[in-house]
Image (cartoon, rainbow, N blue to C red):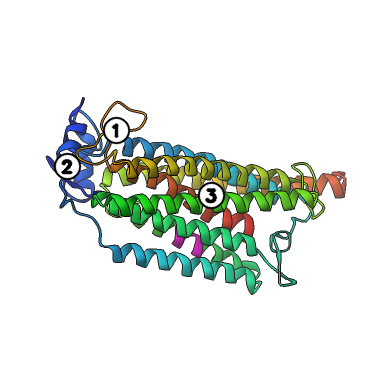
Amino acid sequence: MDDTNQINEKDKKPEESTHKIGIYLWIWGLLFVLSFFSYMVDWYQFQGMLRWSLILFFMFAKAGLIMAFFMHLFWERYALVNVLLWPMTAIACFVFLMAAEFEYTLFSRMFYFFVGGGV
Amino acid sequence: MSDPKIDGFELKPGFRGMASDTGSDQTMFKGVHWGKAMMWIFLLSDTFVFSCFLIAYMKGRGSTPVEWPNPSEVFALEAFGVPVPLLLIALMTFVLITSSGTMALAVKYGYEKNRKMCGWLVLATAIGGLTFVGMQAYEWSKLIHEGVRPWENPFGAAQFGSFFFMITGFHGTHVSIGVIFLFIYAYKVFAGHYENGGKRGWFTTMKGDYVEIEILGLYWHFVDLVWVFIFAFFYLW
């Protein structure tokens, strides 16, 4: 048994700090409001850049609220937060790589299917 | 609960505390329950799995010259004789966020040693998750009746079906597993397995503790988090 667990045994005091219920209810309410707005994006059939930026904004706002407050990352120790968030940059890189890749695939499909590839 | 000030392991805030946490010998994440650290690492790996699915979907959708099916028509549902776009999906989102909120409160009451409230809230979360899975089963059977298959569909690009079943199916599997665990944990909370110093843990010979409810909560919030991304990219985009 390592010392990590011993600390947790000692940690069981009833006056252990918990967060006030208000913060959870606020975040809960905000999540409903943000979901409602992102549904409205589809309801009013916004198109093009406006649609995509609104979808992304509401998505990241919701994800941020869930991670920060429901998953307690806002109060979590820095080592854990950094271990979790830095690998996300790898995902962002992958997104950019594959975005370049699908543009190229689409281009070559168009070129060879419809133009015939002949020069 | 989650706070840098854990008895015996006071850390300075910011990068300084991080350096003393990671830079010293012995264990990292000092004072954090091992199950919680492991759950976070599992969730990180799961993030990569779901990212790969969504990135594959992005590439598939972006590289086809055939028109992609319009999600707000494909997923429309008749309500009072009028087709409402994404009605079922909106309800599913509503149900999942509701269950995420009850889970967050269950974690809070668990740490306050409020056994009854914690138990009821975990049970409510489980029922919310079950409702979600039920609605998803309805959505799947409706689309299958309309002729959507992994290799073809009547609405547009053939890739639509394979990405839809793969991504929502994998997410639904996560929800189903979560629901099973939520029911088990609701029983464990009601049975008092975490009372009086903890009687019984789960998948371990160590004693149980209400921190297990927080670990379960992390998983459940993650399932909700993934749905946020699926909702944005698959249903709204």
Mark 3 or 2: in front is 3
Marks 3 and 1, how far apart at CA: 26 Å
Q: Which residue is identified by label 1? A: B200
Whether residue B81 is situated above or below residue A66 in the rendered picture = below
Among numbered discs 3 and 1, the one appearing first in the sequence = 3
Disc 3 chain ID: B
Circles 3 and 2 on the same subunit: no
In three-dimensional space, the C-alpha distance between marks 2 and 1, rounded to whole angstroms, equals 17 Å
- What residue is shown with label 2? A11
Can marks 3 and 1 be said to lie on one chain?
yes
Mark 2 is on which residue type?
Asp
**Side (left or right) of B47 relative to B76:** left
Query: Mark 1 falls on what kind of element?
Result: loop
Q: In the rendered image, which residue does mark 3 sit on?
A: B130
Magenta-highlighted residues: A57-62
Q: Amino acid at mark 3?
A: Leu
- Estimate how packed mark 2 is, as few (under 14), some (14 to 19) or many (20 or more) residues with alpha carbons within 10 Å: some
Q: Residues within 10 Å of mark 3 (few under 14, many from 20)?
A: some
Residue B71's place in the image compared with A6, above or below, is below
Q: Position of residue B39 (x, y in %)?
A: 38, 38
Q: Residue at x 55, y 67 (%)?
A: A38
